[in-house]
Image (cartoon, rainbow, N blue to C red):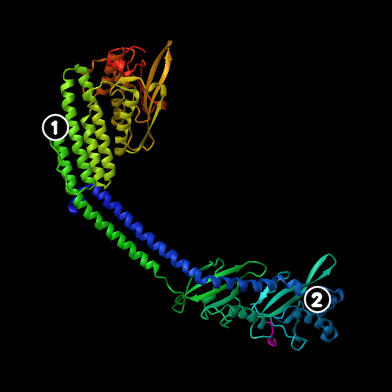
Amino acid sequence: MIKKIISGYYSRMLLFCIAIVCTATITLFIFCGSLIEQRQRAEYLKNYDIELNALSSILSSKEANLTSALTPVFSSTSRYQTLSRLYRERNLSVSSVSYSIIQMMREICQYDSHCRGILLRTGNGRLFQYSPVYDTLASIPLTLTAGVTFTPYRLQVLSDTQLESLSPEYEKPSDHVYGLCSTLFDYRGTSVLPLGQLILLYTTSEFSDSITSTHLDEGALFLIIDRNQNILYSSDGNYQAPADGGLRNFPDEFPASGNLKSDGTDYFYTSVWNVDEYDYLTLCRIPASRIARSSPRFILTALASLICFTSVLLYAVTLRRSDRKIKAIQTGMGRIGQNKLDYRLPVPKNNDEFTQIILSFNRMCDELQQNVERAYLSEITRKKQELYAMQASINPHFLYNTLEQIRVQITQGRCADASQMILLLSRMYRNQTRRNLYVTITEELNLCENLINLYMYRFGNFEYEFFIDNAARIYGIPKNTLHPLIENYFTHGLVPERNDNLLTVSVRLIREDGRKQLEFSIENNGAPISEEALASLEEKLARPVLEQREDSGFALSNVNTRLKLVFGESSRLYLSGGADGCGFRVKFRIPPVLPENLQQGRPGPP
């Protein structure tokens, strides 16, 4: 069995195709399983993505509403001037301006219930804290560290840790807070001078309440981190980043989702960048073990393996059974090729495609034997020239190549194509063995199309076009006039490496010197013909056909001689190269005569 696969070219090619199909099937099934698993994971993480956007929206709304929250400061010129005095004058007593400023701070905190206090940092190094609980404004020492940098005229967000570093006497208004910082400025002529910062303190409980209301997995960690790795919010309460960066060390180009590994544990994360005035990242990290792995991926892989195994098994069984029948058909073809026309293939008991092929082949052999015998008895009395014409039209090499192509179709399992080829071959040889010497142009074109369809199975990389005047179809032509010219294209003109091979056959009814003429043209865009080869063919056409060898322009000479015998010297073949120097063209003209008139020996015009 292995020897048959190795020795047979098409068996190896078919096995190679099966290997490709199996590989593609397994790959496709694995890929589909991965897509299903990703889809299920995306469905699982959809609520987490929604919550991430909700957390991001909470902080974004605080940013968007900051101007509205500071309305009490800018609603009155006197209020703003009082606050500006606190920022400008280093030795100004808080008690002298505390009532007006406290009233402003109170109104700011009342704007948002999550606002737990306000810090006022002046440009001259002073820091004040307003507490809505005690409704007081206290001066506390300012000790800026390298971790806090204030940029004038730029909205900033400060983490809990950064706020604690501002002053040792800073009183945290809640367990965890974050600050939204804006710049207070003053006008000096046409210049704008920054006076300091106004920092609104918000509790992080709003984030926690939002997460709790969604009833998500308690093992999930929600984080809000700025680009400098300061933790604005952490659902586990850990606001201190690890020394080595750990899971909170994110690059600038942080992907939207992916996998993380920390302390030997695998996590999956999904995140949302908010790139605006504050530039922060909202992230959710979930232990990979909490996301259930789906089984369809493994099921699909197993199914793909089963399909591949079944394909290989069916291939082996089919190859073994078909090989025996193919050998029987090859034996029969060999005997027919040895002119043993009385041999018939044994018909199997089962009625499969091979049986239909064998029956068709036997019928073809019956008809072929009968037609050959009839043709031999009738043609033996005809002119030697007509006998040569008939022999030239039945090319044994064409029969061998066609039968070999039928065997290839059977080997590749395309029994329907093989059966159709046998049917086409049977029709062609049935037509060849008919006694009539003249046929209509329609019948001749049908025979040619039958021949082209057979070659289509062999090559498959060409196209053909017929351009026929309907008025010309009823007129007669010597049988097998176009057949050798078309077969000559497939023998010498077709280029197997090209996919744009084109054969064109046209029949036009024209008028020349006041008389009707049928103009035939057979043209292709195949292998170009040199001037030397064209001159050689013209020289061979001028010699008698009986002096020609069958492998050296015999078909062209045969057709040329028969046309001149029937229609006169003016109906000779004209050879030339195709358009643009490619291909080959054969043209000739004959008078329009009905086939029954030709049969009676009247080749003149009707």
Q: Earlier in the sequence, mark 2 or mark 1?
A: 2
Q: Is residue 167 magenta?
A: yes
CB of mark 2 within 8 Å of CB of mark 1? no
Which amino acid, by three-letter code, is at mark 2?
A: Pro
The percent coordinates of residue 9 (x first, y second) are 23, 46
Q: Which circle marks residue 72 in the picture?
A: 2
Which residue corresponds to mark 1?
339
The percent coordinates of residue 553 (x first, y second) are 26, 23
Q: What is the span of residues highlighted in magenta in the rendered image? A: 166-172
Residue 106 quadrant:
bottom right
Q: Is residue 311 visible?
A: yes
The percent coordinates of residue 23 (x first, y second) are 33, 58
Mark 2 residue crowding within 10 angstroms, few (<14) / some (14–19) / many (20+): some
Which amino acid, by three-letter code, is at mark 1?
A: Asn
On screen, 94 above or below 567? below
Q: Which circle marks residue 323 in the picture?
A: none
Q: Is residue 426 magenta?
A: no
The percent coordinates of residue 441 (x first, y second) are 34, 23
Q: Residue furthest right?
A: 78
Q: Secondary structure at mark 2?
A: helix
87 or 581: which is nearer to us? 581
Q: Is residue 234 visible?
A: no
Q: Residue at x 23, y 36 (%)?
A: 401
426 or 572: which is nearer to us? 426
Residue 594 quadrant:
top left
On screen, 509 above or below 125? above
355 or 518: which is nearer to us? 355
Q: Secondary structure at mark 1?
A: loop
In this image, 564 relative to 240: left or right? left
On screen, 451 above or below 112? above
